[in-house]
Amino acid sequence: MTVQTQVFNTISGAAVQATSERFQEPEWLRLARAAAWENFEATPWPSYKEETWRRTRLTGFKLQQFPLAISEAAGSTRRQDLPAEYLSTLNQIDSAGALVFEDGRLIYAELNSEFRDKGVVFTDLRTALQTHDELVRAHFSALVPARENKFAALHYALWQNGTFLYVPKHVVVEKPFQVLVHLSAGKAAMHHTLALADENSEMTLVEDFTGAVDGMSDTVAEITPMAASRVHYLRLQNLDNTAWNFATMRTAAQRDSLYRQLQASWGSRLSKVWIDLEMEGPGSHGELLGLYFPQGRQHIDHHTNQNHKCERATSDLLFKGALNDRSRSVYQGIIRVWPGAQKTDAYQKNDNLILSAGARADSIPGLEIEADDVRCTHGATSAKVQDEYLFYLMARGLDRKTAKRMIVQGFFQEVLNRVPVPGVRTKLELEIARRVGLE
């Protein structure tokens, strides 16, 4: 252990206790923090010898250089007093409610009174601990334990705040709930997302992550769609290109539920993202959608798991990425079918469009089948923009840049057509067009 790591451990170990004391956390949470910190210290740092880290190196990453952002009690800001960039993001979506965080501090919150009267809870996680302690305690870290990986352990030891969303039985909320999470420069921030859709309910949650210049984001998301519920989770990662980003997400889909998740990865210097889709109830259906467009020296790594534990469940994964300059992407995914999970229908596809000679995409799809009455397929492609496609468009009066932009936008359209929120779809289209225009 280096001297710098020893110093970090000393400072952060004290921060675990200080965080609990500052917010007067319940005893169960204080014990969970301490256990998570012990887990973090006991877990070795990732090694390139591990399969999940073999293509992603933490070169240049020094944990001790990121002081923990200090999260204070929730504040109160009027919508019109929010910074212009926050308002611009919020105004893109007609939402049922909105939360805005700065370094773990909730600075703005709103919820349509119609849904509040129906029992919907949409607030920051610290407030939920005070008002719905039993509900939080029952689900917090139930899907993603601290032992999941070293960064999950660090998250549970030092997390500051997060999103809490609960939709009661038979309540349908067609408009999305919107969350904006902004991180300051040079800091480490830990945002936790806990979303629960009770039986036969419907909800859509959109989270935007921005900022973190020369900083680090270490997040965990736990989403639970109960029986016959319908959940859409759209996560837009647009951190600064100097940020380090680590995220662990898991969903447990119950009987006859529908779950759709979009992961859009635009920003960060390096992203390591784990997404687990647990099919735990018969008749459940899950979709995992992914978009990424790294440039410069960005490195984006997604690891997915479609875990079928029961019969008659279906899942569908589609991740698409375009790579420019000397960027790199890694996609590693597996479909696991447990013994007895008959009538499983699972699909997995990863497509990559290489826009420059220096870019590289690694794609490793996989199957692990332990049942005999299933339909599981996977595939992966990597290709350059074909000259004949460019020639065809240019022959009809388009310049080369416009022709290339149309090809790239068309490449992503298969995913964009499945984004359930029009405002998010428009935002993604504009970001794709902007990135193609930077060439």
Image (cartoon, helix red, strand yellow):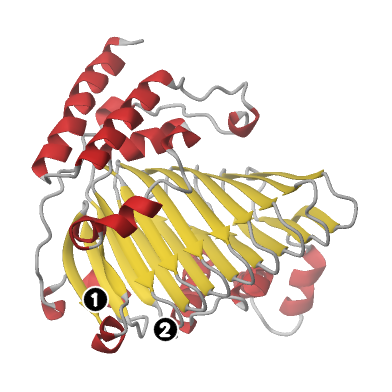
Residue furthest to the front in view is: 134
> Residue sitting at 85 percent across and 49 percent down?
371
The crowding category of the residue bearing disc 1, from other C-alpha atoms within 10 Å (few below 14, some 14 to 19, many at least 20), is few
> Residue sitting at 24 percent across and 87 percent down?
113
The crowding category of the residue bearing disc 2, from other C-alpha atoms within 10 Å (few below 14, some 14 to 19, many at least 20), is some
Viewer-closest of 291 and 23? 23
Viewer-closest of 361 and 256? 256
Q: Is residue 43 visible?
A: yes
Instruction: Specify the amino acid type for callout 1.
Output: Leu
Say whether residue 393 is left or right of residue 275: right
Image position, residue 387 (x, y; %) = 78, 64
Image position, residue 155 (x, y; %) = 34, 39
> Residue sitting at 68 percent across and 62 percent down?
318
Q: Quadrant of residue 418?
A: bottom right
Q: Which residue is mark 2?
A: 173
Dot 1 lies on which element?
A: helix
Say whether residue 97 is left or right of residue 388: left
Viewer-closest of 358 and 110? 110
Say whether residue 168 is left or right of residue 333: left
Which mark is drawn over residue 163?
none
Dot 2 lies on which element?
A: loop
The CA distance from mark 2 to mark 1 is: 22 Å
Q: Which residue is mark 1?
A: 87
Q: Is residue 413 above or below residue 48?
A: below
Q: Quadrant of residue 311?
A: bottom right
Instruction: Specify the amino acid type for callout 2.
Output: Val
Q: Earlier in the sequence, mark 2 or mark 1?
A: 1
